Image: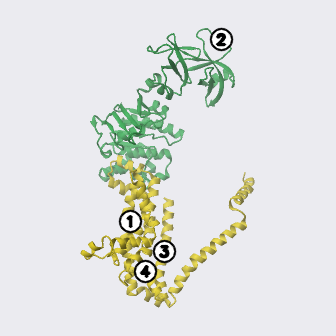
Amino acid sequence: MFAPSTPMARRQARTLGGSPLLRWALIAVALVFLGVFLFVPLVAVFTFAFQKGSAGYLAAVSHPEARSAILLTLTAAGIAVPLNLVFGLAAAWLLSRFRFPGRALLLTLIDLPFSVSPVIAGLIFVLLFGRQGWLGPWLAEWDLHVIFAVPGIVLATVFITLPFVVREVLPVMQAQGSDEEEAALTLGAGGWRTFLRVTLPKVKWGVLYGVILCNARAMGEFGAVSVVSGHVRGVTTTLPLHAEILYNEYDFTGAFAVASLLTLLALVTLVLKKYVEWRSEAS
Amino acid sequence: MSVVVEQVTRRFSPGGSPAVSDVSFHAPTGAITSLLGPSGAGKSTLLRLIAGLEAPDAGRVHIDGVDCTRQPVQQRGVGVVFQSYALFRHMTVRENIAFGLEVRRLPRAETEARVDEMLRLVQLEALGHRYPGQLSGGQRQRVAFARALAIRPRVLLLDEPFGALDTRVREELREWLHALHSRTGLTTLLVTHDQEEALEISQHVVVMSEGRVAQAGAPEDIYNHPASPFVASFIGGASVLRGRVQAGKAEVGSLALDVPAAAREGEAVHAFVRPHDIKLARHEVSTPGPQPVTGRVARLKAVGGFVKVLLALPSGDEITVQVSRSEFDALGLTEGDAVRADVLSASVFVGDYAI
């Protein structure tokens, strides 16, 4: 049985995979492409960052302005991620369990931060909270500063990263249905206990995946934050903005040292992402 | 702990046809009552209404004589087993069974003892620490039974519990459920589309069609005295013969059958004949008495110990006849043969109808 099937398998591989020459050509194209656009820049970031040795690197990342940028980035992400986690879970639960008028509109609105240019997103907040904006006079009356201040950066970050958790959790919830939740109800569990003991464990890998992506974007966001930031050094500059400022001042070593922190974040994110994918497939 | 359903209606979309329409029935205490019907008959919706997973648009549900129409599902004290098992996949078998007991804040020792008792009841003592994903379909469904029974429910509601299992396991579990019921004596409602399952293990059967109760009663009554053309055709795989009322008899082909007293002359008649209520003979053999139905063998299907003969009648009707293997061999039938068919018994309905 085995021997006659082998040539057939080979024939099948040829029809599906094309000739070996074509296969190798495609692999080579993919590798060159990845090398030029991913690997070389990655190496470049760390090469430039350590141009003045590890002392220069440490000086750049421990500079007070750099430290304040790190703190602000962590603050913005630290507020945006939990908010979007709660919103994402609630919205995914709502959208997967109920059919209601306006459901399609809500789904479209959730995708809005993905479809709108980040710069436009930033401008929306300027137009809302800026001095000439709708709420500007009212804010001025109470001496509240949103634009060119930390609240504006947090708002812009929340807006930009809003879809990540919903978009990851919704398909998982839809695929798993609500049978287990109904079983929990018949066993006497209330809504809250059912959510904590049954729903959340079912979707936990989807949630974690969404949180990782949400966090990566929150820390790396440039466009929207740049518009609302006002670039007050050491006050309203996040890590990406700080890297840009240093670069514009021809401090390449400093710019790349700061950039290398973001690159490390990206690498950690990738590893975590792979781990979560592996675990969610295993379970 | 009887279950009484009174004039219950459930509509999923306003203005649409109701999934359950003005349904009333009574599930007696300590019996297995089957809700039997084709898919889309509304039987699962009805079970969910009794469980409290759906709310009726009209009508009342009583459990143990108490109106619980507005009671939330958690307080109804019903054990539900779903077709999809609905086990908590991230919990072990023991944790699954203990879930309802933890909700009730039972002391730990008592919970453990009850879980052990349930594992013995469903004969899964050795598998308590497995996850649902590591069990076979039949084992999973037994865990689902154990989880539902652990909370000592007043009523057991089963929604096609064996629907996702293969035939052999299904028959095994049917036997097991029968034995379990004789031990616990729990009032049980079983939703099924499998008439064999319903007729075999229940003491009371409610046949449903298009959201309504078509007939309710003891299994033998429903089998022997179907109340409507639908029940007659749904139960027992009967074939239909069409004819007219002539001289107070139903003339079906060349056959004259008794008709209900109210029949008017010339009215349409449908006779439902079960596959084993027909006796075949070769056409040449002539016997005295009423003239038999004659037909031609259109197709032969050998199914294990018996043969299904599809007979094409001159009227255009087709009937299925079930013949034992030895009988079939004695007749020596082949496709295209002319045969006579003696109808031993039939259910006759007067008037037009559509299934």
Q: What chain does mark 3 sit on? A: A
Identify the image quadrant of residue B301: top right
The secondary structure type at the circle numbered 2 is loop
Q: Is residue B31 visible?
A: yes
Colour that chain B carries in the picture: green
Amino acid at circle 4: Leu
Chain letter for the yellow part: A
The reply to the same-chain question for discs 2 and 1 is: no
Q: Which residue, as the protein is rendered here, is positioned at the far left?
A: A142
Q: Which residue is mark 1?
A: A84
Name the amino acid, label 2: Ser
Foreground disc of the pair 1, 4: 4
Q: Which residue is mark 2?
A: B286
Tag shown at residue A241:
4
Against B80, is B310 above or below? above
Which chain is mark 4 on? A
Residue occupying image coordinates x 49% and y 63%: A279
Work out how far the residue at label 4 is from the one at label 3, CA to CA, in angstroms.
Answer: 17 Å
Is residue A204 something that shows in the picture?
A: no
Between marks 2 and 4 in the image, the one whose residue lies nearer the viewer:
4
User: Marks 2 and 1: CB-CB under 8 Å?
Assistant: no
Q: Which residue is mark 3?
A: A266
Q: Position of residue B62 (x, y in %)?
A: 30, 36
Viewer-closest of A201 and A246? A246
Residue at the spot 63% in from the left edge and 73% down from the top edge: A31
Residue shown at the point (48%, 69%) measured from the top left: A272
Q: Is residue B301 left or right of residue B230?
A: right
